[in-house]
Image (spheres, grey):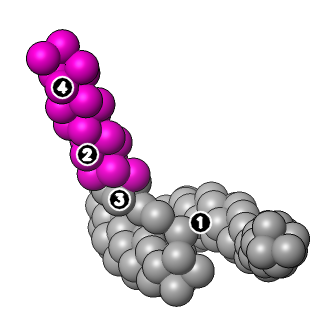
């Protein structure tokens, strides 16, 4: 009887994870598209300014570089925040981290080695 309950709980967990994973995937793809679009728009805007004589070409290139650097920093901050939130969410869902799995693998290897040593003696 307990096995049935465990299976039902696992199925419920997987059902909950799939929409979350799909929503996260969509958000990440949308953000990648937005970043690419923003970069194109910035470059086009600066090009128009240069063409109209509003700014010098070198200043335009410098401006694009500065904006892109700032965008990279902001993107890194957003990625770090997203990583943090996903890690917290996975923790609440009791999903083991890569570090947890690696630690368990190391313990299993050590125990296997001890068992083998005991078998030999």
Upstream in sequence: badge 4 or badge 3: 3
Farthest residue, direction top? 120
* CA gap, disc 2 and disc 3: 11 Å
- Mark 2 or 1: the one toward you: 2
Farthest residue, direction left? 121
The residue positioned 46% from the left and 64% from the top of the image is 96
Q: Which residue is mark 1?
A: 35
Labels 4 & 3 near each other (Cβ < 8 A): no
Residue 102 sits above or below residue 64 on the image? above
* CA gap, disc 2 and disc 1: 43 Å
Q: Picture quarter containing residue 67? A: bottom left
Q: Which residue is mark 2?
A: 107
Q: Residues within 10 Å of mark 2 (few under 14, many from 20)?
A: few
Q: Secondary structure at mark 3?
A: helix
- Magenta part of the protein: which range? 101-121
Give the camera-side residue of 56 and 20.
Answer: 20
Q: Which residue is mark 4?
A: 118
* CA gap, disc 2 and disc 4: 16 Å
Upstream in sequence: badge 4 or badge 1: 1
Q: Residues within 10 Å of mark 1 (few under 14, many from 20)?
A: some
- Mark 2 or 3: the one toward you: 2
Q: Which disc number belongs to residue 100?
A: 3
Q: Secondary structure at mark 4?
A: helix
């Amino acid at each position: 009887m307990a096995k049935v309950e465990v299976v039902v709980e696992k199925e419920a967990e997987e059902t909950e994870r799939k929409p979350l994973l799909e929503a996260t995937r969509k958000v990440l793809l949308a953000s990648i598209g937005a970043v690419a679009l923003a970069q194109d728009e910035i470059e086009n805007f600066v090009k128009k300014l240069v063409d109209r004589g509003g700014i010098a070409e070198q200043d335009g290139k410098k401006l694009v570089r500065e904006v892109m650097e700032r965008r990279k920093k902001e993107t890194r901050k957003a990625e770090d925040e997203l990583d943090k939130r996903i890690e917290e969410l996975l923790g609440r869902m009791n999903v083991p981290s890569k570090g947890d799995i690696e630690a368990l693998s190391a313990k299993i290897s050590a125990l296997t080695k001890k068992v083998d040593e005991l078998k030999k003696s």
